[in-house]
Image (cartoon, rainbow, N blue to C red):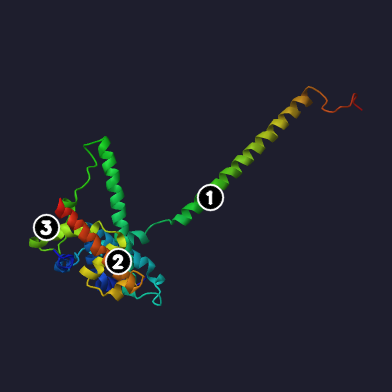
Amino acid sequence: MNIDNKLEKLKKISRVDVPPFLFTRIKQSIDSINDAPVSVKWKFAFVASAIVLLALNIGMLSNFSKNKNEQGLEQVVNSMQLSSSNDFYYE
Amino acid sequence: MQNETRFKVLFEAYKQLVYNLALNYVQHTEDAQDITQEVFIKIYQHYEKHDPELASFKTWIYRITINHCLDFIRSKKSKKRFGFISSLFNSETNEPITDAAHFNHPGIAAEDKEELQQLLKLVNELPENQKTALILVRIEDRTQKEVAEIMNTSVKAVESLLQRAKQGLAKKLNEREGL
């Protein structure tokens, strides 16, 4: 059979009506997109700021514990009347 | 697009075009409904981006619909491949759906169903641009000039695509009849 005759049969496909509920379905999808609470951009900004805050906290804590250790050592030296200087005699 | 009434008017004007074109690509009512939904959501979101100097609104809608249909078919094919691989390991689940069972085109009369199903199966096996040209000219009844505008190509290129599509189909039909 000639291919053109065969392809002519595609003209038999008729146009159909769109289901009546489709607009409501589309409208609901659009509304749910519009109601989305936070965009991806904002989510990214939130995560980035949380990471910065966490890093600052860790930095502060490590500094604080370092200072605390140094203070403790000084107290022990003073109570035992040990000299932390390199001089031989007290003046 | 902010105006709801305007969107409703647009939907009423182009719903037939989008739904029927999707139906001709995927030959399944539910899939065509899903594609129509995605297309109109895209129109709603990107309405302001449409440049009337580049293409008419109708051409723009045709392009969005065709791209969505092709993406849908590609993703379905990859899912089918994954389903087949999974079924090798677990025969009880992920059984691929047969094409015959999936075929559901309400625009085809019952007496033509078998013949047109066979023909559309062969059309589906054509390369994407040949299939697009064939659907637009033979089913959607668009002129070659319109198709060239939609596909962003020349009329000569559309002629060539149609010619190659015909040759491809004739070859496939001969192979089938030879078996």
Kind of residue at badge 3: Glu
Q: Is residue B109 left or right of residue A65?
A: left
Label 1 secondary element = helix
Q: Nearer the viewer, residue B49 or B44?
A: B49
Q: Which residue is mark 2?
A: B161
Label 1 packing within 10 angstroms: few (<14), some (14-19), many (20+): few
Q: Residue A58: give x, y in percent of width and height.
A: 60, 40
The label on residue A48 is: 1
Chain at numbered mark 3:
B
Q: Nearer the viewer, residue A72 or B106?
A: B106
Give the residue drawn at x 28%, y 52%: B76
The label on residue B61 is: none
Label 2 packing within 10 angstroms: few (<14), some (14-19), many (20+): some
Label 3 secondary element = helix
Label 3 packing within 10 angstroms: few (<14), some (14-19), many (20+): few
Same chain? Circles 2 and 3: yes
Q: Which residue is mark 3?
A: B114
Marks 3 and 1, how far apart in space? Answer: 59 Å
In terms of image quadrants, where is residue B115? Answer: bottom left
Q: Is residue A11 left or right of residue A27?
A: left
Kind of residue at badge 2: Leu
Task: Mark yes or no: residue A26 visible.
Answer: no
Q: How many numbered discs, if any?
A: 3
Q: Is residue B1 above or below residue A36?
A: below
Give the residue drawn at x 28%, y 39%: B86
Give the residue drawn at x 61%, y 44%: A56
Marks 2 and 3, how far apart in space? Answer: 26 Å
